[in-house]
Structures are given as structure tokens and as C-alpha cells.
Image: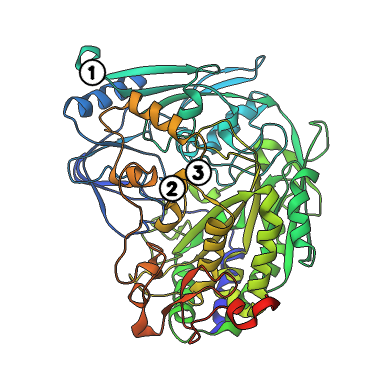
Amino acid sequence: MGSMLSFLLLAILLHLAGGSPPPEPVVCTDGTSNCTVTNSVGSFPDRIVCRARSVTYPRTEQELVGAVAAAASAKRKMKVATRYSHSIPKLMCPGGLDGAIISTERLNRTVRIDAKKGLMTVESGMVLRDLVEAAGAAGLSLPNSPYWYGLTIGGLLSTGAHGSSVWGKGSAVHEYVVGLRIVTPAPASKGYAVVRELGADHPDLDAAKVSLGVLGVVSQVTLALQPLFKRSVTFVTRDDSDFADQVAVWGRLHEFGDMAWLPQQRKVLYREDDRVDVSSPGDGLWDSLLGRSIPTRLLINGRAAEERLQEGSTNDTALCAAGRLQADSLERQAYGFKNDGLNFTGYPVVGYQHRIQASGTCINSPEDGLNTSCPWDPRIRGSFSQNTDFSIALSKAPAFVAEMQRLRDLSPDTFCAGIDTRFGVLIRYVKASSAYLGKPEDSVDFDIVSYRSRTDGMPRAHADVVDEIEQIALHKYGGLPHWGKNRNFAFDGAIAKYPKADEFLRVKDRYDPDGLFSSEWSDQVLGINGSPNIVKEGCGVEGLCVCSDDSHCAPEQGYFCRPGKVHGEARVCSTSANPYHTSQILGSQV
């Protein structure tokens, strides 16, 4: 079984063909009525199907105003859906059966570019791929961005999406916003909807540029760009003996530097990534191996093999072997970087910013009848995962890393199931932001993608590892969950960690006093009403709660609610028969 999974992983990573782009996130049974809306993986953390009364696809700002006005006049809840709806939580779910979806898919054009001033205005539904290409064609660069270019500018701003940098203005795209136009509800005397124009000095811009979509619908965004530049990328793998020390300084040493930690292998992959002059030779390209289309049959077979290892008789040896093979294959292929756009010949890879900063070629190809697809396409039984993503203050990151290493040292092979076979822990840097819901201080972001069962309540192998790491981060080190990722329990109490949350809520009350762009989920996350936790049988397994009772796990399958192994206040679903954590057993030794 282990060799089969390893073979499939290798075949998937080596495949180079294009294929079917992701499906539409909104599906209706009666034209544009009786709809469901979902995210890119086809499932929210609570697995509930989100329904809506209707969807509209405005093509102009005037049509967008009309869509908001129509819903506002009927006092109907509204939410925005983007082209690929890549956010994991229920940000786009209006709640109930009478809500309206407003899609920005057709608001996807460049409005204007002023190359002399370095300003670019685009509609909010433009995907990052098209934005950076248009900027590059005009001799400009968006200095930072997320790594996946299937996000829309409106969507990535709403969730505070970012790349990796603490240089200059940092890695969050919202730090480069100098203006936006947003459509919000209005009284009948104003036609039920108005366009608010926020310039660089407008006091509400810091609320609107990271808003979770609860203020209204962003129509246009103006970005301050920089003259076209190139980047030079080199990857170096070292052991993790000085990992805790390096996490404190790496982001200062390299403008776009990041890391990936492979805990069971005791390795750290360091990305040396720096700006170079535009005259530097090289026309490099990043075609990420993880964002390419894959033959559907390979994806299905790979998932089936993974399910047998994760949900059957867990084989740590096979999972660890698969993780090592995967890491070796990624390294041999330079993680998708190519010196001339076609081949990799050696480091450094030098290329223009818009060809290096983001990738995701599986969205580029015409439909091929699902012979191939993005790995996570919900129309097939391929990859299905959960995404744990949180940031910790840069000053606290070394201590947190050391604590993760302590947990690893107790049982290294248990990290293979949830981390090493899913490309490790990606570590990026984010600078402090003036945005009310942005990072309040310079931070280190830790991103973990791990296996998720398609069966509700089915535990994954060694789930307690990732769950304990997450609770250590959020509860001991004051970590902040990424707004566009994570399971429910990560958001419990998160809003209290933002010093300017009250200022954001005051703007929200002015822009949308009736809460038409709010939902039960957003009210819970923003601390307005209720909790994002859903306490029921199996909630600890699903990440809907932190377990406090064995019934929150899966006792019939041998999973019980236990203290963490290094953090005694953590509560995780574990197969361990011992209800005590290591500090209780070893005393002062831990």
C-alpha cells in the first residue's frame, strides 16, 4: 500500500498536461433561482449545504448597484461569490433560503492604468493572474501577492490574503490599496444602494480593505504599484537544528523569503528570494507543481490509497516513505520553477515579478470533460483536505517553533500523516497593518494542509498532532486565524485579539445598519452574536469545537478527548490510552 501511494504521488507530481478548470461555485436549478453556493473544495467545515434564493451576475457598476438595491428594498440578506470562491469558511453563505448571491465573476476588467503614477484600477472580480499580467504589460509590478493566482482582487482583500515579506509595506495586498469603490445598502430616499468612494486618506479605508464582505460589495480597487522588477529565487534544504533561531531572522534577510518545515524528516526548505534589477538576465517562470491539472484517474486512485492509510489500519512507515518520496520529487523538479519558462537548469531562477509571484495553471485550460482537473476539484473524488492557517507575532515565533519541535520529538512518525505527506508547514512573513482586521504586529504565518475524511465524524490518523499545534498557537501564543481558511473553533474569540475591532464594527454599522451583508456565521466570528463553535457528537474530530468530552471525538473508534502531549491545556481527540500529558508525567523535565 505504501509503495502504491508513493507511486501515485510521484506520477501526479510529474504530470504536465492542462485540463478542466474548476467548476462554478454557484449552481441553480431554475435559471438564476433556487441556488446552492460552495467553496473551491465543495464543502464548508460544518459540511452544511448553503442555499440561496437567487444569484445575479452584474457586468457594470450600475448593474451592481441595481442588484444591491433590489435585495435591500426587499430586506433580503446578501453575500458575494467570486469566480472560484477559494475561501474555506462560510463567508459567501447568506443563510436561510431567501438570501441573494451577487457574483463578481463578470466584473473582471482593468478600468485604468497610469504608468507614470504607478496606479492601476481594476474591477473587484479580476483574478490575480490577469491583474499581475496586465500590470507587467504596462511596465509595473504588484510588489506582493498570495501564491495562488486564482483569487480575485476583491476576495483576497476581504480575507487579508498575503505572500511573504516584512520589507517595505509587507506582503499583504491590502497594504497597496490607495482607493476603492464599494456599493452599500442605503435608505429608500437614496434608491436603496449607494456607491461610496474611498480615497487613500479616507478614514474608512482601513475598514473596507479587509472587511470579510460585511460592509457591501467592492466594485473597483486602485492599487499603488512599483516599476517592473525581477526576482532571484534559490531553494536550500538544511536540517532543522537551528529552525527556531532562523524563523526570527529569515524574513529580514530575504525580501520574499519563506520556509517549509518537514518535521518527520527534520528538514527545513529555505527559499532565498530577493528583488534584482530588471536588467538581470533571466526569464524565469513559476509553474507550481501543486497547482497544475492532473489526470482524474490518478487523483482518484491516489485519494483511494490515502484513505486506506488514513482511515484503515494506519501505516506510519508507508506514510513517512510517501512523504520523503514526495519531498525528493518536488526538489528534483525545483518546485515548478523554470529558468526559461520551459526548463529548469539550475539556481538561481531569475524572472519578472508577474511570472514568479504566483501560479496555478490548472485554472487556465479549456474544459476537457474532466479527463484532468485541479487536484481539489469537488466534481471528482480526488484530494480533500482541511487548511489550518494562523499567524503568530514575530517576537513569539521562535518559542512556538521550539514547542512544535518538542511535540515532534515525542513521536516523529506521527507527523507524517497530517504534515509531511501534505508538503510540510509553509511559513511566511506578514507585516503589521493599519487595516482594522489586518495583522496588528509583524507576524509569522504557519500554513498546514492536512487530510480530511469525506465521512462526517471520521477521524484522520494522528489528528491530535495538528490539533495540538493549532491550540498551542491560538491559545498559548495568541495566534490569529487566517480569515479565509480554518475550521470553526479557530475563530472562537479571535476578534478580541484585534485592537481596532470596535472601530471596524462602527463602520459596519454605518455602512449596513440592517446587517444585510451579515450572516449568522459573520456575526459569530465578529463577536456580535453567538459563537462559531458547534458543540455536538464528533465536533472535536471535525474541528467544530475543542473537545471537552469523549463524545466530541469518536470513542467507538478508539478516539477520546485527552490533554495535549506538550501543552496540558490543549484538548485533542487521541487514541492514546494515557489521559495525562508529558508535563504531568515528567514534571520539571518538560
Comparing labels 2 and 3, the label whose residue is closer to the camera? 2
Q: CA distance from mark 3 to mark 1?
A: 36 Å
Dot 1 amino acid type: Pro
Residue at 80% x, 54% y is 345
Other residues around mark 1 within 10 Å, as few (<14) / some (14–19) / many (≥20): few
- Going from N to C along the chain, the mark reached first, 2 or 3, is 2
Q: Which residue was labeled with disc 2?
A: 87
Q: Which residue was labeled with disc 1?
A: 187
Q: CA distance from mark 2 to mark 3?
A: 11 Å
- Going from N to C along the chain, the mark reached first, 2 or 1, is 2
- Residues under numbered marks 2 and 1 in contact, where contact means CB atoms less than 8 Å apart: no
Model colouring: rainbow
Other residues around mark 2 within 10 Å, as few (<14) / some (14–19) / many (≥20): many
- Going from N to C along the chain, the mark reached first, 3 or 1, is 3
Q: Which residue was labeled with disc 3?
A: 150
Residue at 69% x, 45% y is 285
Q: CA distance from mark 2 to mark 1?
A: 31 Å
